[in-house]
Image (tube, helix red, strand yellow):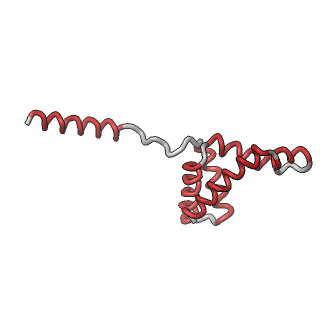
Amino acid sequence: MAALKVANFVVLAVATFGFGLPAKAASDYPTSTVAEYVYACMKANGENRDMLQRCSCSIDVIASVVTYDHYEAAETFKQMGLVAGESGALFRESAPAKTAIGELKRAQAEADVRCF
């Protein structure tokens, strides 16, 4: 009987401790990055509740596939690649740029399949 009481106490203590802590974030993406992604996604696809859900799902899938550091690098390569001429060529044509952008495109394709 005493062992059962101790076991119940341990289960209760673990549950209390576990539920008392804030939930661990699904990713290490900053809130501003998530908000920017969802905002741009909704602007492109429609500004309604359904798109809010789908766009939020999309960034969650991307975050589960690509680390924030890789996401940030790919987005930087994409933005800098928009610069015309030789200045942007490095960001469009280098092996690291192609690898980073390719990784992000695969994550976005996975997000499209799962969320849209």
77 and 21: which one is in front?
A: 77
Q: Residue furthest right?
A: 85
Instruction: Please report the residue visible at 64 percent of the width from the left and 66 percent of the height from the top.
Output: 46
Q: Residue furthest left?
A: 1
12 and 62: which one is in front?
A: 62
Please state, as top left, top right, bottom left or bottom right, where the N terminus lies in the image. Answer: top left
Find residue 53 and report its horizontal and vertical position in percent.
53, 60
Quadrant of the image occupied by residue 56: bottom right
Quadrant of the image occupied by residue 45: bottom right
Left or right, 19 with respect to 114, comes to left
Find residue 9 and report its horizontal and vertical position in percent.
19, 35
Count the numbered circles shown. 0
Find residue 41 and report its horizontal and vertical position in percent.
65, 59
Quadrant of the image occupied by residue 94: top right
Find residue 8 and report its horizontal and vertical position in percent.
18, 39
Instruction: Please report the residue visible at 32 percent of the width from the left and 35 percent of the height from the top.
Output: 17
Answer above or below: position of 36 versus 6. Answer: below
Q: Residue furthest front?
A: 95
Instruction: Please report the residue visible at 26 percent of the width from the left and 35 percent of the height from the top.
Output: 13
Please state, as top left, top right, bottom left or bottom right, where the C terminus lies in the image. Answer: bottom right
Answer above or below: position of 64 versus 5. Answer: below
Left or right, 23 with respect to 10, comes to right
Answer above or below: position of 47 versus 106. Answer: below
Instruction: Please report the residue visible at 68 percent of the width from the left and 43 percent of the height from the top.
Output: 72
Left or right, 46 with respect to 11, comes to right
